[in-house]
Amino acid sequence: MSDKSRGLTHFDESGQAHMVDVSAKAATAREAVAEGRVEMAPETLARVLEGSAKKGDVLGVARLAGIMAAKKTADLIPLCHPLALSRVALELEPDPALPGLRIRATVATSGQTGVEMEALTAVTVAALTIYDMLKAVEKGMRIEGIRLLRKSGGKSGPYEAEA
């Protein structure tokens, strides 16, 4: 059985990695939503909310980093197609119950391949940016739960993660 027949589209019949040929696919509206969180001590979260983190506006910088990362996904993930993104939105929400920050990225395009990797990359880089900006205060923060929540568009149709 070939890798392709098992659904591993980034490998050719001889098992070599390749970029998937999407030239015959129709361009459709595509959207993906991913989430993750950065868990931290209540005192660290308080610094974020007070705006007293030494490096500045943690949420604003992390939001911009996530947006920039989504646009650069093809430069980071070797077999991703470069895409013209029509929307990248990041929500960073403080959650005292964690305690920490919840991150959600929504990415959209009209194209021949999906934007799941762009949404996941946006969340990941936003989380890493939060860690970088707060590591002087707390090195034990944890980046957790990065996952695809849902996607729409394309041949494989919609996907919704289980709760």
Image (cartoon, rainbow, N blue to C red):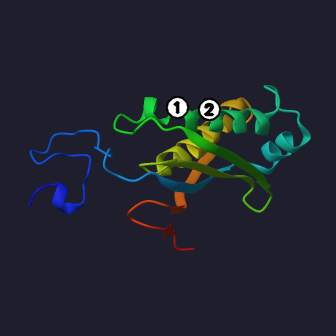
Viewed as shown, does residue 10 lie left or right of 73?
left
Residue at the image point whose x is 58% and y is 38% from the top: 125
Can residue 79 be seen in this snapshot? yes
From the viewer's perspective, tell me whether residue 68 is left or right of residue 95. Answer: left
Q: Secondary structure at mark 1?
A: loop
Above/below status of 52 relative to 161 = above
* Quadrant of the image containing the N terminus: bottom left
* Observer-nearest of 79 and 130: 79
Q: Residue furthest right?
A: 50
The residue carrying pointer 2 sits among few (fewer than 14), some (14 to 19) or many (20 or more) residues within 10 Å by Cα, namely some
At 58% from the left edge and 50% from the top edge, which residue is drawn? Answer: 108
Alpha-carbon distance for marks 1 and 2?
6 Å
The answer to whether marks 1 and 2 mark residues whose Cβ atoms lie closer than 8 Å is: yes
Residue at position x 80%, y 46% from top? 45
- The residue that disc 1 covers is 72
Can you identify the residue that label 2 sits on?
Answer: 68
- Percent of width and height locating residue 85: 57, 41
Q: Residue furthest top?
A: 55
Observer-nearest of 83 and 23: 23
Residue 134: mark: none
Q: Amino acid at mark 2?
A: Met
Q: SS of the residue at dot 2?
A: helix
